[in-house]
Every structure is written in structure tokens, then in C-alpha cells.
Amino acid sequence: DSGVTQTPKHLITATGQRVTLRCSPRSGDLSVYWYQQSLDQGLQFLIQYYNGEERAKGNILERFSAQQFPDLHSELNLSSLELGDSALYFCASSGRGTSENNEQFFGPGTRLTVL
Amino acid sequence: GEDVEQSLFLSVREGDSSVINCTYTDSSSTYLYWYKQEPGAGLQLLTYIFSNMDMKQDQRLTVLLNKKDKHLSLRIADTQTGDSAIYFCAESRGLRASKIIFGSGTRLSIRP
């Protein structure tokens, strides 16, 4: 158990809809990262937040947005969903300060299926 | 470019050694990592190497780093069925190594 939790575990929705994925980082971690894993694209970095502020942006679509709240949990919002958005979405956290190598700890993922 | 590249598949016989290769692009990377993803689970750090090292050994795992060629490899000795997973190579970039770029992963399958 990495200490990172994600909800829901599975999500099935229709094209055009909007969903919110939630992540709670390990206790004390300030950074939260979001990744998308699909069969054809592999693991893609989407976005990073550090202590409530956006730190780095990857291949995140304009239809997607994220935020990190004062209690450090994060939400990833996916809107106007398309079939190609079906994927596993991982959250990771780091930054407790005790890790010398900036290891990221991954949650179990949310599997999104868009029908 | 930003790519960390690795081959998609590797099949080895149980008991043999597995060698998973990776090339990266940023010569200033501080750390290079190998993450393991078992079926239905998230990624987990398997091992890492600091960029001023050439080799790191940890039980059945050996990591080799060739900075000149920007080549990283992971050798798993005496490969077991429990080693079946996807292995991701990753490099750190930026301030305090805060940005990590992952490869697309190598799926290791073990045949009897």
C-alpha cells in the first residue's frame, strides 16, 4: 500500500459527459502528479501540483483540468469526454522530504471507460 | 525531444536473466529510475541510480548506466514468474529533480 488513495476505482460514462477523479496523497506529501495510461499512448504525464499551485504541465488536453485543495487532496476534471479518453488515470505523490531521490508513490488508479 | 525510449515487449525463460534497456535524452538528469507495474496495480519504485554512478546492485537486480550513450539497463537475474510485469524507465529533470519523464514501459513475460 503506497498510502495514495484514488476514487472511484472504476468509472463508466458516456461521450460528452464530465467526470471528476479524486486523489489523496500520502500524508505529508506536497506534490501531486496525474498520469494517463492507455494501450496506445503508454504512460503520459498530465500535470503536477505543489502545495496548491500548478508546478508543471505535460500532455494535458484543454478539456481536462485539475486542482489541489488546501488539505492537499487533488481532483482531475475531464469534460466533453470522448471514446479515446478511456484509460487508467493514476495519481502519484512525493515531497515529504524524507526521500533523497524524489520517489513518486502511485495510487491504484481509476479506470475510466467512455462508451 | 523529451522521449525516454524502451522496447515494448520482452519474453524470457524462467530462470534466465532478463535485460531491459532504455535510452534517455537529458544529460543533466540527476536520478534514473526503474518502476514496476504489476497487473491491476499502480507503479512502484523498484530501484534507482544516481547519475554519478555506473552500476548499482540490489539482490537480483543490477542497474547499469552509460552516461555517454544515455543508456540505462535493468538486469534481473534468475527471472521468476512473479517478475511478470511492466517495467518503466524514468529520468528526473528540473529543480530538485521534481519532473520525472517516464518511458512507455516494457512488458516482461516469463515462459516456462
Image (spheres, coloured by chain):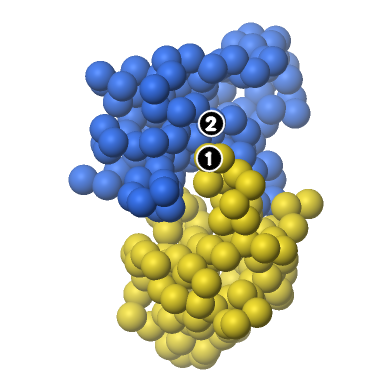
Q: Chain of mark 1?
A: A
- Residue that mark 1 sits on: A101
Up the image or down, B104 lies above or below B87; here it is: below
Identity of the residue drawn at 63% across and 47% down:
A98
Up the image or down, B15 lies above or below A79; here it is: above
Which quadrant holds residue A30? Answer: bottom right
Secondary structure under tag 1 reads loop
**Which quadrant holds the C terminus of chain B?**
top right
Question: Mark 2 is on which residue type?
Answer: Tyr
Q: Chain of mark 2?
A: B
From the top left corner, tell me how far across and down residue A102 is, in percent: 53, 46
Identity of the residue drawn at 72% across and 63% down:
A27
From the top left corner, tell me how far across and down residue A113 is, in percent: 59, 72
Chain B colour? Answer: blue
- Residue that mark 2 sits on: B48
In the rendered structure, are the residues bearing label 2 and label 1 in contact, judged by CB atoms less than 8 Å apart? yes
